[in-house]
Image (cartoon, rainbow, N blue to C red):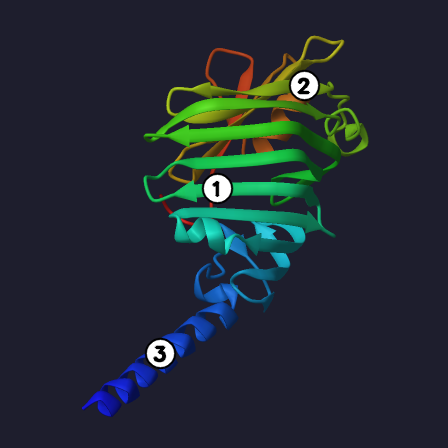
Amino acid sequence: MGGFKIRIWHVAFFVTALIVFAIARAPASLIVPSRADGLAYARTEGTIWNGRFIDARINGVDAGDIAYTVSLFNLVRGLLDVDFDMEGGALRGESLTLKADWRGDRRLIAPTLALEGAQVTDGLTLVGATRIEGLDLYFSDGRCVTAVGRLSSDVLARSGALLGWQGPQLTGEASCRDAAAQLTLIGSSAEGDTVQSILELAPSGEGLWRAFVSTQKPTLRAMLEQQGFRTFEGGPNVALSKDFRWLPMPS
């Protein structure tokens, strides 16, 4: 009888070890499937703990290759802790950290992020760069608790030839607004045109980008309307908005 128990224990140990080994060697695609409205990629390398998303795109933006490591120690404690780098694409960043726990808390830390160019619409891609420094977003109890970071963009200032209009330099910062984190860029040209770009990041992983341009130039308004901007009746403003996902996993 004792020998029978030992054999059953051996089998149970073997099955458990096999399951752990299979999970450890499993590709990231099993947990984070490629999706066009979030994180899309051509293929994965490595495992769910340490690997790469190859030819990745985040909401249609070229993110190159995303290398990541997942902390097994923190995962056992109920905390998803992912360190990752993005290189080789239009969107780049080093030493980024994403944390999430079983209560629904979320935290994103990005010492530096840079986006080369800006695809405003399918037919309008601008040059220049948008940069974020010292970004730290923390969500708890379904709300934005803290949001810090500095933003700058020379995209409009460097895209005069494409737009037929010399836009302003944009600067801004991150803040909490209601339940969402808000990343704002704003600037005014020497001719009095005002531009505002607002990125709202909800703790659920949903996002909303809105752009507002205030101008008295009929040619500029007409060009923006052709690109999908909506005119506000009785005023100088035109606006454009897009929904997206900024977290690959739902809340």
Residue that lies at the very extreme toward the front in this rendered image:
2
* Foreground: disc 2 or disc 1: 1
User: Which of the 4 image quarters holds residue 157?
Assistant: top right
Residue, disc 1: 99
Regarding residue 44, the answer to whether it shows in the image is no
Q: Amino acid at mark 3?
A: Phe
- Other residues around mark 1 within 10 Å, as few (<14) / some (14–19) / many (≥20): some
- Other residues around mark 3 within 10 Å, as few (<14) / some (14–19) / many (≥20): few
Image quarter (top left, top right, bottom left or bottom right) of the N terminus? bottom left
Regarding residue 102, the answer to whether it shows in the image is yes
The CA span between labels 2 and 1 is: 27 Å
Marks 2 and 1 in Cβ contact (< 8 Å): no
Q: Position of residue 37 (x, y in %)?
A: 47, 50
Q: Residue at x 42, y 30 (%)?
A: 139
Report whether 163 appears left or right of 84: right
Q: Earlier in the sequence, mark 2 or mark 1?
A: 1
- Other residues around mark 2 within 10 Å, as few (<14) / some (14–19) / many (≥20): some
Report whether 221 appears left or right of 24: right
User: 111 or 115, which lies in front?
Assistant: 111
Residue that lies at the very extreme toward the left in this rendered image:
1
User: Which of the 4 image quarters holds residue 52?
Assistant: bottom right
Q: Residue at x 80, y 29 (%)?
A: 158
Q: Earlier in the sequence, mark 2 or mark 3?
A: 3
Residue, disc 2: 171
Q: Is residue 20 above or below residue 83?
A: below
Please tell me whether mark 1 sits on a helix, a strand or a loop.
strand
